[in-house]
Image (spheres, grey):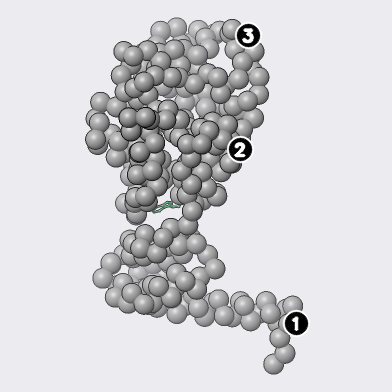
Amino acid sequence: MPFQRDPQFVSRTSEIAQADVMLSSETRCERVAIIGFGGVGKTQIALEFAHQLRERQPDCSVFWIPVTSIERMLEAYLEIGQQLQIPNLEQEKADVQKLVRRRLSQESSGRWLLVFNNADDIDIWTDKVDMTAGLGRRIDYMPKSKHGSILFTTRSRKAATKLAGKNVVLVGEMDETTAKDLLKKSLIDQDLLTDDGAATDLLQNSPISPLQLSKQLHTLMRTKSPYLSIQRFSTMQSRILSSSLARNLRMTGDITT
Ligand SMILES: Nc1ncnc2c1ncn2[C@@H]1O[C@H](COP(=O)(O)OP(=O)(O)OP(=O)(O)O)[C@@H](O)[C@H]1O
Ligand SMILES: [Mg+2]
């Protein structure tokens, strides 16, 4: 696994539980896609899911494949092949994807989870490419085993449906409790969140998402005001908001004073 847990991570419990039910229950689905808008937290959910799975089943291997480009994907396949000590990987004509698929599809490979992260571009999966056995589509080259599961994260509903059918976990904005938890974690000293009403107001009146808000707050604390409370941050935000709103309205000439 490529990443450490983020200390500021707040658990998206319900999304993680949904993925878990789909991937682990008796009538389990082999492939599940986490879908949602850019930046909403899909990759973080996949990462946390993988960490939790490893805690429960330390013998389960987790492989992480970024699908931001074909090159990145093939590089990751090569690394997996090396970890699995598959012979003949480095040969010029070796079809690494096929070798990895074959190995993971064997029962002797044990339990595994494969995460295809940021699988937004459906063409990567459906274009016909030159495989050793002739032309093939990457979507048909995925490993399959009763001990293996595949998790995708994607912004594209089309890709999700192609890759995982109906097995999708939809990620929306955070609920209020999770968002407050996140704001609290963004504070250097968590006792600075004394005013729950201010946090509620901030979240309800902000035009940006809780994730963006918490980032702003965190950056501000690190660079300028380490002892900023949510209440003060909230006041600052509403000032900024009302002045930019007023400016916009003035610019469009909608208001006369
Ligand atoms: N549950 C969370 N707790 C704390 N921070 C989070 C959480 N989810 C997301 N973030 C923050 O938001 C950023 C964006 O999240 P993430 O990369 O998971 O989004 P994404 O949906 O995968 O976006 P993209 O579609 O661009 O890949 C992360 O780098 C992280 O800082
Ligand atoms: Mg992502």
Q: Amino acid at mark 2?
A: Lys
Q: Nearer the viewer, mark 1 or mark 3?
A: 3
Residue position for label 2: 158
- Identify the mark at residue 253; answer none if there is no mark: 1
In the visual, does 13 lie left or right of 135? left
Spatial CA distance of label 2 from label 3 is 26 Å
Q: Is the C terminus in the top left, top right, bottom left or bottom right quadrant?
A: bottom right
Is residue 132 in view from this perspective? yes
Q: Residue at x 46, y 43 (%)?
A: 169
**Sequence order check: which comes first, mark 1 or mark 3?**
3
Q: Residue at x 51, y 43 (%)?
A: 35
Report the front residue among 38 and 236. 38
Q: Position of residue 127 (x, y in %)?
A: 65, 24
Name the secondary structure under disc 3: strand
Q: Nearer the viewer, mark 2 or mark 3?
A: 2
Task: Say whether mark 3 is within 8 Å of ligand 2.
Answer: no
Q: Are there few (<14), some (14-19), or many (20+) residues within 10 Å of tag 2?
A: few
Q: Amino acid at mark 1?
A: Gly
Occupied quadrant, residue 121? top right
130 versus 215 height, above or below: above
Q: Nearer the viewer, mark 1 or mark 2?
A: 2
- The number of discs equals 3
Q: Position of residue 67 (x, y in %)?
A: 53, 32
Residue position for label 3: 134
